[in-house]
């Protein structure tokens, strides 16, 4: 019998094909040209605009919106991409409600900000769908740089370095480039294989060689890279996952949310992906929400997002929390897992309610769980790295590490807020610093 | 409820909203729909002489200027006078007037500048039972090339001459429609009055090219790659029309000459403004062409509500009320001193006032690191640009200083008395105010 959302255990194919297609379609469908004009017209072209200040890559938002409003979306795209070469992805995944759109004066005035993210997508899509790459390389410098990690930080850094005339080799442990854009972001935020299309477009600058299946520490060492290249940029993200150190934490049915999402992103048939009837996601960040929502969209009957603090402390934005709630995810707060129960495979999870200061109340609750997804943080893998700060690579200025000739940015570097847009900014700024350093 | 009844040079209509002579009034079918929708009157689309009718282009006749969300702000047209048979129009006019005796039906006419031509058509029009005629001395395209329309309206002597013929051969009111494509609107108005006109109506449309196609290099609307100037109308022309109306209303030579106001009237408020500047009624075209005849219902309810609120029982109660306040620059009170004031509770910190003042005006607005914008009274000349560019209504206001206060910009005490340029010491032609 075909499984349904009511079937117990972990099952694939709980929904029919049409439901999968609808569930994983574009979260924010693209603007058509008229919608873009109307939305663009709402921009006040503020002086020293607060939205620009709020953007980690400092895109000149009023200018690009005016360029859309005056019928030149390709010029708008160039304004965006000059500051943020992954402006297309950022338009899709940025938590704009806590960045540019929160700062928009119309948010203050009316609670309805200019739709900056969707306008940015309109402009960048308009340019990229024509296959136009508006940047070209400077004269060759004869310098070479190794970039470790083909995620947002690494690709941003690589593009800027290539544009400045350097030759760049990008190493990545995975079989495809894109990093979390390809493996780690909810499918409905970047449908139609946008992550790979964006990388293909980005590489049109030339001068960038991609080396896949090359992990730092396994296939090459930092010392080797330092010897072979004039500079090294580390942007490999966080490869490790925090363990769930509770009784029964290794039972069947317990997996990492990042792996769950990566499998989902790489799947060609959502109906082939197994998902529990009662899914519990532990964590409070974007990864937790992405995993919880997508579990629901795969056909899980009950999905609970369990977080140890209050909603106001969740790293996931209010928009993300509301999205989860709207999809039917139950958000439990002030709970800490104490034990997983079940004979071999997990059947129930037991939480203790905790106070704001994380002291236990002694009150516990058990809820059904045939799948438990851990989203309780990731860790930096590897040794022989530059000095660390809080488990991440310590950096000063524009990504300078404790090692001469080695820069770092993105999630693997200390500081920042682990957003795609922050990674892009850090990669870009490190590239400028590397350039200045190499050209002395 | 206020009485919107209109009596314009003896022509009665249930409200002061007439449809102007234009495409909406070209046929019985349209006019009946207009009356059913509530329009007080129509000026039938311009009739020409007996004989083969004019022909129109077979390509686009209109071009437009848009605001946000394709809101139509300005429209131009290259349509000519009616291209239907004269007698068909006359029969329809007669039927419609008979069926709608309480509505105003005015017939617009444009025939060559020869007495015989007018002598021939006027009895035919008289026979329709229409309430009056309007002389089309304004159409700026096509017909003007043939010595009619604005070609007549640009020569006061012709206006006077033709008006006199009309008064001679026609017994009912004669309204002269003026072209704005001249230097001084007072001259044609005075000529109309001298010729015996019962009223003037203005403005007709303004010579215009709405846009150029940057691919084909053709002006729009494009007829097989070429464009001709059209007549501009719609909300964009309202300020020009109101200025011209006011000039006629306050000119001693034409003061009191009844005026039918035309030019971008889109809402009840526009209509009320024209009436305060001396108009006895108003004519509308573009608003109807943009939204359909139903817009008159908003105009009726809006004007009525406003009149009730202000205690105006009839149109005459406020007609011309703003005319005494229209003056020449030289008579403006130079002792009146104002300062911009920003309401910090309403300010949304967009900084447009700052950019405008800092870049293009008097550097009279400060910006703090926390985006608080404040007026620097020492620099503010009260130019009003900050008010105009602020996206929040009433956030920035102009506050008059009280006599006795010292203007921090000039260091001078604000005088209580009125004083203008004619007596100002900097004016070489000043006459001593003794």
Image (cartoon, coloured by chain):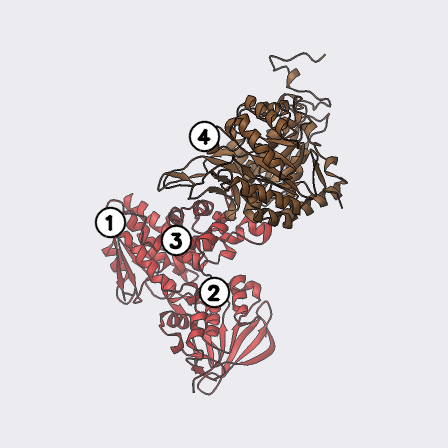
Colour of chain A in the rendered structure image: red
Q: Numbered disc 2: what chain?
A: A
Q: Secondary structure at mark 3?
A: helix
Nearer-N-terminus badge (3/1) = 3
Label disc, if present, on residue A143 of the rendered structure: 1
Of residues A195 and B6, the one drawn nearer to the viewer in this rendering: B6
Q: Quadrant of the C terminus of chain B?
A: top right
Q: Secondary structure at mark 2?
A: helix
For label 1, count other residues whose C-alpha is less than 10 Å away and answer few (under 14), some (14-19) or many (20+): some
Do badges 1 and 2 share one subunit? yes
Residue at 72% x, 29% y: name it.
B402
Q: Numbered disc 1: what chain?
A: A
Label disc, if present, on residue B145 of the rendered structure: 4
Question: Which lettered chain is shown in brown?
Answer: B
For label 2, count other residues whose C-alpha is less than 10 Å away and answer few (under 14), some (14-19) or many (20+): many
Pair 1/2: label in front:
2
Q: Secondary structure at mark 1?
A: loop
Residue A84: image location, x then y, percent: 39, 51
Residue A431: image location, x then y, percent: 33, 50
Q: Is residue B124 left or right of residue B223?
A: right
The image quadrant of residue B188 is top right
The Cα–Cα distance between marks 3 and 2, rounded to whole angstroms, is 24 Å
Residue A143 sits above or below residue B155 on the image: below
Pair 4/1: label in front:
4
Q: Is residue B234 left or right of residue A424?
A: right
Q: Which residue is mark 2?
A: A286
The Cα–Cα distance between marks 4 and 1, rounded to whole angstroms, is 73 Å
Q: Which residue is mark 3?
A: A124
Do badges 3 and 1 share one subunit? yes
The Cα–Cα distance between marks 3 and 1, rounded to whole angstroms, is 30 Å
Nearer-N-terminus badge (3/2) = 3
């Amino acid at each position: 019998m075909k499984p349904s959302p009511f079937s117990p255990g972990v099952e694939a194919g709980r929904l029919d094909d049409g439901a999968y297609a609808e569930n994983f379609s574009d979260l924010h469908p693209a603007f058509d040209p008229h919608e873009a004009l109307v939305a663009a017209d709402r921009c006040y072209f503020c002086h020293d605009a607060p939205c620009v200040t709020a953007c980690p890559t400092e895109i000149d938002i009023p200018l690009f919106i005016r360029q859309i409003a005056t019928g030149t979306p390709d010029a708008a795209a160039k304004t965006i991409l000059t500051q943020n070469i992954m402006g297309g992805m950022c338009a899709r995944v940025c938590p704009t409600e806590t960045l540019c759109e929160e700062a928009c004066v119309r948010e203050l005035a009316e609670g309805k900000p200019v739709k900056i993210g969707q306008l940015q997508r309109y402009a960048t899509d308009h340019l990229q769908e024509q296959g136009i790459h508006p940047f070209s390389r400077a004269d060759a410098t004869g310098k070479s740089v190794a970039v470790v990690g083909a995620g947002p930080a690494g690709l941003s850094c690589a593009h800027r370095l290539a544009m400045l005339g350097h030759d760049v080799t990008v190493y990545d442990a995975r079989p495809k480039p894109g990093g979390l854009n390809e493996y780690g972001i909810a499918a409905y935020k970047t449908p139609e294989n946008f992550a790979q299309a964006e990388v293909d477009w980005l590489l049109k600058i030339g001068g960038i060689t991609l080396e896949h299946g090359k992990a730092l520490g396994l296939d090459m060492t930092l010392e080797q890279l330092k010897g072979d290249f004039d500079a090294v940029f580390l942007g490999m993200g966080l490869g490790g996952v925090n363990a769930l150190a509770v009784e029964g934490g290794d039972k069947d049915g317990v997996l990492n949310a990042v792996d769950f999402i990566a499998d989902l992103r790489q799947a060609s048939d959502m109906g082939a992906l197994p998902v529990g009837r009662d899914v519990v996601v532990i964590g409070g960040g974007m990864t937790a929400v992405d995993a919880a929502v997508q579990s629901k969209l795969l056909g899980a009957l009950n999905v609970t997002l369990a977080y140890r603090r209050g909603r106001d402390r969740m790293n996931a934005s209010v928009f993300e929390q509301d999205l989860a709630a709207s999809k039917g995810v139950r958000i439990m707060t002030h709970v800490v897992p104490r034990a997983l129960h079940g004979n071999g495979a997990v059947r129930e999870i037991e939480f203790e309610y905790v106070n704001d200061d994380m002291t236990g109340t002694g009150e516990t609750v058990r809820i059904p769980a045939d799948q438990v997804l851990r989203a309780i943080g990731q860790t930096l893998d590897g040794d022989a790295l530059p000095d660390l700060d809080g488990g991440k690579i310590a950096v000063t200025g524009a990504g300078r590490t404790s090692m001469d000739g080695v820069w770092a940015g993105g999630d693997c570097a200390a500081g920042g807020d682990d957003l795609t847009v922050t990674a892009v900014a850090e990669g870009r700024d490190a590239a400028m610093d590397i350039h200045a350093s190499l050209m002395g | 409820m206020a009485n919107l009844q209109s009596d314009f040079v003896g022509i009665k209509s249930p409200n002061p909203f007439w449809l102007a002579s234009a495409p909406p009034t070209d046929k019985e079918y349209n006019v009946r729909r207009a009356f059913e929708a509530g329009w007080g009157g129509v000026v039938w689309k311009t009739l020409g002489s007996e004989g083969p009718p004019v022909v129109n282009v077979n390509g686009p006749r209109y071009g437009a200027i848009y605001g946000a969300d394709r809101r139509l702000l300005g429209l131009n047209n290259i349509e000519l006078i009616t291209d239907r048979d004269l007698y068909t129009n006359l029969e329809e006019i007669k039927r419609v007037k008979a069926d709608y005796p309480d509505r105003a039906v005015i017939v617009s006419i444009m025939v060559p500048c020869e007495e015989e031509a007018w002598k021939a058509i006027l009895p035919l029009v008289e026979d329709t039972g229409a309430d009056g005629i309007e002389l089309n001395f304004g159409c700026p395209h096509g017909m003007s090339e043939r010595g009619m329309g604005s070609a007549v309206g640009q020569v006061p002597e012709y206006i006077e001459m033709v008006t006199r013929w009309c008064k001679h051969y026609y017994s009912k009111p004669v309204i002269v429609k003026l072209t704005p494509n001249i230097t001084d609107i007072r001259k044609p108005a005075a000529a109309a009055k001298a010729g015996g006109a019962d009223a003037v109506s203005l403005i007709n449309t303004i010579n215009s090219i709405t846009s150029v196609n940057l691919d084909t290099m053709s002006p729009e609307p494009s007829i097989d790659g070429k464009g001709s100037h059209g007549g501009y109308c719609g909300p964009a022309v309202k300020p020009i029309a109101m200025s011209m109306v006011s000039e006629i209303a306050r000119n001693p030579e034409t003061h009191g000459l009844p005026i039918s106001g035309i030019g971008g009237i889109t809402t009840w408020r526009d209509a009320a403004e024209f009436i305060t500047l001396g108009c006895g009624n108003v004519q509308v075209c573009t608003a109807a062409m943009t939204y359909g005849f139903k817009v008159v219902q908003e105009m009726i309810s809006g004007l009525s509500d406003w009149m009730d609120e202000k205690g105006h029982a009839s149109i005459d109660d406020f007609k011309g009320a703003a005319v005494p306040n229209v003056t020449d620059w030289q008579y403006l009170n130079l002792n009146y001193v104002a300062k911009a004031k920003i309401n910090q509770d309403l300010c949304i910190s967009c900084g447009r006032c700052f950019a405008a003042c800092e870049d293009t005006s008097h550097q009279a607005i400060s910006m703090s690191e926390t985006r608080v914008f404040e007026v620097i009274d020492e620099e503010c000349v009260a130019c009003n640009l900050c008010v105009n560019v602020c996206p929040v209504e009433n956030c920035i206001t102009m506050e008059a200083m009280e006599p006795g206060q010292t203007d921090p910009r000039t260091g001078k005490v604000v005088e209580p008395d009125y004083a203008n340029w004619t007596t100002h010491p900097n004016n070489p032609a000043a006459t001593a105010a003794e």
